[in-house]
Image (tube, helix red, strand yellow):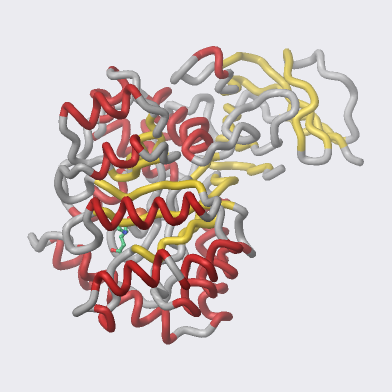
């Protein structure tokens, strides 16, 4: 048993839930953690003795980022699509099938090596909890394999057999939904905590999404959903109605969607890297926050719509282009992500929570947006 004291923290962000959607902060603080769990939080210079002392010399300490949406199990590269989008072509769901072909052809070792590299990129940028989806396999064997590999990197694994209809089912989408809700679900459920569906033109419609999420719920999985990425749809309301933990993208929202979100318990997860990489309009985070909706920010790291592993980048864009304050963006990238994953052990700095802590090479978290693109993540403690 080893205890560590983080001393002389200039500014500590705790996200005490009593402060609602805003970061709770304290100045001149210290933290002690033991065996991966926080055992004491208080004023600098007053901490109980610990085996090891780390003096952070006035730096800012924040909870580790909780990236609640990523697709890290894939092979191949789609830089050409990004290049075409930057000169005017729009994003469409169909590109997913290119990654499916490359992923099916890759070996387990190859897939795991790439995903491991992305998780280390994330860790170096302050992410200590990550959700990882399947969804580039789209056969029973390939979806199970993605989830088994994802399970080696995180406990937050999501079954996304309903990403798109694969080419071999092009003439029989109903047959594919039967597979996703039947044999594929049976095989994948033991390896997944969540089920997700891409509810959008070119992927799955609302009726299909309802059937898919319902089958996952019946099998004991928590639900999450991709909706409102390319156009408004009933998907957002469906997510709230089904009690989904989170509905993600929410780029296009109607007044009715916002009312539904503010009356329900579903987190709206915004993915600013997607609008950045597809030249779409940014969602209006302030409108959601003003309506009392719980907002999370995540990377959506994937080779098609958002190939960034960086939560600091997403925070900078959220502040610059989604209308969030630096404090709101930080909250959404930590406590908000935790809520989107129904986790209360992460995203918060308090006694008894996981010691997931990021020391910023900056006096304040405001620098995450004020100094975009600068590597400000210093030491990362993951439990
Ligand atoms: O979340 N929207 C659906 N799935 C991913 C994109 C996947 C891809 O283009 O490969 C997303 O943006
Ligand atoms: Fe996604």
- 331 sits to left or right of 166: right
Viewer-side residue, 106 vs 325: 106
Instruction: State ligand 1's quadrant.
Output: bottom left
For image coordinates 77% across by 40% down, the residue present is 36
Q: Quadrant of the N terminus?
A: top right
Viewer-side residue, 44 vs 209: 209
On the image, the x and y values in percent for residue 150 come to 56, 64
Q: Is residue 116 above or below residue 108?
A: above
- 176 sits to left or right of 334: left
Q: In this view, does 57 lie above or below 34?
A: above
On the image, the x and y values in percent for residue 208 come to 28, 57
On the image, the x and y values in percent for residue 26 come to 60, 14
On the image, the x and y values in percent for residue 14 come to 59, 22
For image coordinates 90% across by 24% down, the residue present is 49
Total labels drawn: 0
For image coordinates 19% across by 28% down, the residue present is 256
Q: In which quarter of the image is the C terminus?
A: top right
């Amino acid at each position: 048993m080893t205890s560590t004291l983080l001393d002389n923290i200039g500014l500590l962000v705790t996200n005490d839930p009593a402060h609602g959607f805003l970061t709770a902060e304290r100045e001149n603080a210290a933290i002690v953690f033991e065996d991966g769990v926080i055992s004491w939080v208080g004023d600098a210079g007053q901490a109980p003795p610990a085996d090891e002392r780390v003096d952070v010399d006035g730096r800012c300490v924040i909870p580790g980022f909780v990236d609640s949406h990523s697709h890290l199990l894939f092979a191949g590269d789609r830089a050409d699509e990004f290049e075409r989008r930057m000169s005017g072509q729009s994003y469409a769901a169909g590109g997913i099938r290119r990654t499916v072909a490359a992923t099916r052809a890759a070996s387990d070792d190859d897939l795991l090596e790439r995903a491991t590299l992305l998780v280390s990129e994330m860790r170096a940028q302050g992410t200590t909890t990550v959700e990882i989806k399947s969804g580039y396999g789209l056969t029973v064997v390939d979806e199970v394999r993605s989830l088994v590999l994802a399970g080696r990197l995180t406990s937050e694994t999501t079954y996304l057999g309903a990403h798109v209809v694969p080419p071999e089912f092009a003439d029989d989408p109903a047959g594919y939904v039967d597979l996703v809700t039947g044999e594929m679900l049976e095989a994948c459920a033991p390896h997944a905590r969540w089920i997700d569906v891409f509810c959008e033109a070119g992927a799955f419609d609302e009726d299909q999404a309802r059937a898919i999420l319902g089958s996952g719920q019946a099998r004991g999985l928590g639900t999450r959903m991709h909706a409102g990425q390319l156009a408004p749809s009933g998907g957002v309301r469906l997510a709230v109605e089904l009690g989904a933990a989170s509905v993600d993208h929410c780029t296009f929202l109607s007044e009715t969607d916002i009312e539904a979100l503010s009356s329900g318990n579903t987190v709206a997860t915004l993915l600013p890297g997607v609008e950045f990489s597809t030249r779409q309009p940014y969602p209006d985070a302030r409108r959601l926050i003003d309506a009392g909706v719980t907002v999370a920010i995540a990377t959506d790291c994937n080779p098609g719509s958002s190939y960034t592993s960086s939560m600091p980048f997403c925070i900078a864009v959220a502040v610059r282009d989604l209308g969030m304050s630096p404090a709101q963006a930080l909250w959404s990238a930590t406590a908000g992500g935790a809520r989107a994953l129904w986790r209360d052990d992460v995203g918060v700095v308090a006694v008894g929570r996981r010691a997931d802590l990021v020391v910023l090479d900056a006096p304040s978290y405001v620098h995450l947006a004020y100094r975009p693109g600068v590597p400000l993540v210093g030491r990362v403690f993951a439990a």
